[in-house]
Image: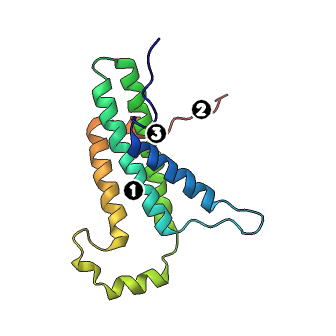
């Protein structure tokens, strides 16, 4: 019988991030008194940042798992590819949502061209391009295409 690591000692930051996502999911959900909140660009930007952080984690886990356990490493690499597909769709949805005019007014007052990461609307694009660059070094274009599970007759 193997001993399990007590939950308070195992990966506290990852557990906190998961709890934060669960809390936000409950906060966005509708209740009897309030209608559901719609997604906005800020939500999708933060979600994209979370997904790209998960991409980095999965990439490192797959890299360290593959030599001693090739089959498990392949599964993690497959999960990494599918997470990239989800990240890419969140990025596309971000650009399809209308910009918040109040946020644009604040942005113009703070001189975003002076920010080291560039204007806030471009931060998601820079993050997405950096994640895509890492992904494309290790995968082929056919790996990145979504797999169809429909039955062809």
84 vs 64, left or right, is right
Camera-nearest label, 3 or 1? 1
Classify mark 3: helix, strand or loop. Answer: helix
Which mark sits nearer the N-terminus, 3 or 1?
A: 1
Q: Which residue appears at 34% of the width and 17% of the height?
A: 69
Location of residue 14 in the rendering, given as x and y in whole percent from the top left corner: 41, 43
| Separation (CA) of disc 2 from disc 3 | 14 Å
Identify the element where label 2 is drawn.
loop
Circle 2 residue: 149
Tell me if mark 2 has few (under 14), some (14-19) or many (20+) residues whose alpha carbon lies within 10 angstroms of its own.
few
Q: Is residue 33 left or right of residue 76?
A: right
Per the image, label 1 sits on a secondary structure element best described as helix
Rendering quarter of residue 119: bottom left
Q: Can you say which quadrant of the picture contains the C terminus?
A: top right
Q: Which quarter of the figure has residue 26?
A: bottom right
Q: Which mark is residue 49?
A: 1
Between 112 and 92, the one nearer to me in the picture = 112
Q: Which numbered tag is attached to residue 82?
A: 3
Q: Label 3: how many residues lie within 10 Å, few (<14), some (14-19) or many (20+)?
A: some
């Amino acid at each position: 019988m193997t001993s399990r690591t007590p939950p308070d000692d195992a990966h506290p930051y990852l557990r906190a991030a998961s709890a934060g996502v669960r809390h936000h999911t409950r906060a966005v959900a509708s209740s009897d008194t309030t209608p559901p909140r719609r997604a906005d660009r800020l939500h999708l930007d933060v979600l994209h940042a979370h997904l790209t952080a998960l991409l980095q984690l999965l990439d490192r886990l797959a890299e360290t798992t593959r030599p001693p356990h090739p089959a498990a490493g392949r599964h993690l690499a497959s999960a990494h590819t599918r997470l990239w597909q989800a990240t890419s769709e969140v990025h596309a949805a971000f650009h399809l949502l209308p910009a918040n005019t109040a946020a644009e007014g604040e942005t113009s007052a703070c001189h975003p061209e002076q920010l080291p990461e560039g204007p806030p609307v471009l931060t998601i694009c820079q993050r997405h391009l950096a994640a895509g660059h890492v992904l494309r070094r290790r995968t082929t274009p056919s790996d990145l295409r979504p797999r169809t599970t429909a039955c062809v007759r």
